[in-house]
Image (cartoon, rainbow, N blue to C red):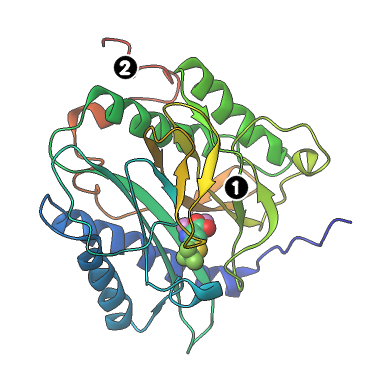
Amino acid sequence: MLKRIETMNAAALERMRESCSLAAECLVMVGERIRAGITTDEINTWVHEYCLEHDALPAPLNYKGFPKSVCTSVNDCVCHGIPDGTVLKDGDIINVDVTTIFPNTHGYYGDTSVTFYIGEPSEEAKLVTEVARRGLELGIAQVRHGAMIGDIGAAIHEYADKMKCSVVRDYVGHGVGREFHMPPQVPHYRARDAAARLKMKAGMVFTIEPMINLGTYETELMKDRWTVLTADRKLSAQFEHTVLVTRSGVEVLTARSALVKHSEDLPWSDLGPLSTPAAFPASS
Ligand code: MF3
Ligand code: CO
Ligand code: CO
C-alpha cells in the first residue's frame, strides 16, 4: 500500500525555505568553530543555541527519545552519533547532521549534514568523504519532474562502485516537511522494487543523504539504540541536502550562502564539474 506523497504549494515552500536555510547556515557556523580539541558536546551546544537564537528548535532533541540536539558521527560512526565528551583529534572525520523546526510559527523541518575534516586527513578519510560528497551531487543531478526515485540511488551506487566504496542500505533519505520523516523513502543504493519506480513530481520535497563506507555496507546498532557503526569498524562519511522537485529539475533548499570551512574549502574537495565524476582520487 503506497501512502500518498505530499506536494508543497508556494506558502508551504516559503516555510520550508526558512527552516532549510537556517539548518544550512548552522553548518556554516559549525565550520567556523570546529577544530581538534573540542568535544562533540560543544558542537551540540553551538547548534542548540544557534537554533534558539533564531526562534527555532533543534528537531533531534527528544525525537523518539534522542537525547541531544544534533547528531555527531565520528569516523566509523555511520549516523545518529550522540554528542558526548569525545574529544576531536587530528585526522578524525565527523558528520554533523542538523535538523531545524519552527514550532511556534509553522512547524516545517529542514534537514542537512556535512562531513568535516579535523586536521590532516588520511587518504582513506579523503576517499570516503569525497565519494559521499560527490555521491550526493550525483544523486541531486537525477532529480526532476518525471524521473524515478530509483534513479538517485542508481547514480550514487554506480559511482561508489567505481570508487571501490560501499553504500549503506539500512538508512535512507526521506520525505520531509511538516514531519521529520515521511514518505517517500529515498534509497542511496540500486533498487528495482515498486518504490524505486515511483515517479518524482514537481512540489515533492525529500532528503538525499548517502552514507558511504570504506569497507562493508553493513552496519551495527549499538546498545544505546541510536549510535550506528560500520560492521567492520572502517570509516564512513555522509552528506545530506533537502531538495525540492521542480518542473525543470531541482532546487536545493538547504543550499548555503558560503563554503563550509573544514569541509568544502579544501583543495581536494573541489571536484570540478559533474561531467567528471571520477576526478577524485585518480592521482593517488
Ligand atoms: N537527521 C537525521 C536524518 O537525516 C535523523 C536524526 S534522528 C535523531 O534523517 F533522532 F537521531 F536525531
Ligand atoms: Co534526513
Ligand atoms: Co539529517
Residue 226 showing in the rendered view: yes
- Mark nearest the camera among 2 and 1 is 1
In the image, is residue 49 above or below residue 267?
A: below
Residue 180 % position (x, y): 57, 68
Task: Classify mark 1: residues with Cα within 10 Å, few (<14), some (14-19) or many (20+).
Answer: some
- Residue 258 is left or right of residue 68, and the answer is left
Q: In the displayed image of the protein, which residue is found farthest to the right? A: 1
Q: Earlier in the sequence, mark 2 or mark 1?
A: 1
Q: In the displayed image of the protein, which residue is found farthest to the front? A: 223
Q: Quadrant of the N terminus?
A: bottom right
Which residue is depicted at the point 49% across and 15% down? Answer: 162
Which residue is depicted at the point 40% across and 37% down? Answer: 236
Q: Are marks 2 and 1 in contact (CB under 8 Å)?
A: no
Task: Classify mark 2: residues with Cα within 10 Å, few (<14), some (14-19) or many (20+).
Answer: some
Give the camera-side residue of 82 and 150: 82
- Residue 141 is left or right of residue 189, and the answer is left
- Residue 75 is left or right of residue 100, and the answer is left
Identify which amino acid the numbered label 1 is placed on.
Val
Q: Quadrant of the C terminus?
A: top left
Q: Which residue is mark 1?
A: 172
Residue 64 % position (x, y): 56, 73
Q: In the displayed image of the protein, which residue is found farthest to the bottom? A: 104
Q: Which residue is mark 2?
A: 281
Which residue is depicted at the point 24% across and 51% down? Answer: 258
Give the camera-side residue of 94 and 226: 226
Residue 254 showing in the rendered view: no
Which residue is depicted at the point 44% across and 25% down? Answer: 274
Q: Is mark 2 within 8 Å of ligand 3?
A: no
Identify which amino acid the numbered label 2 is placed on.
Pro
Give the camera-side residue of 76 and 56: 76
Residue 158 % position (x, y): 57, 21
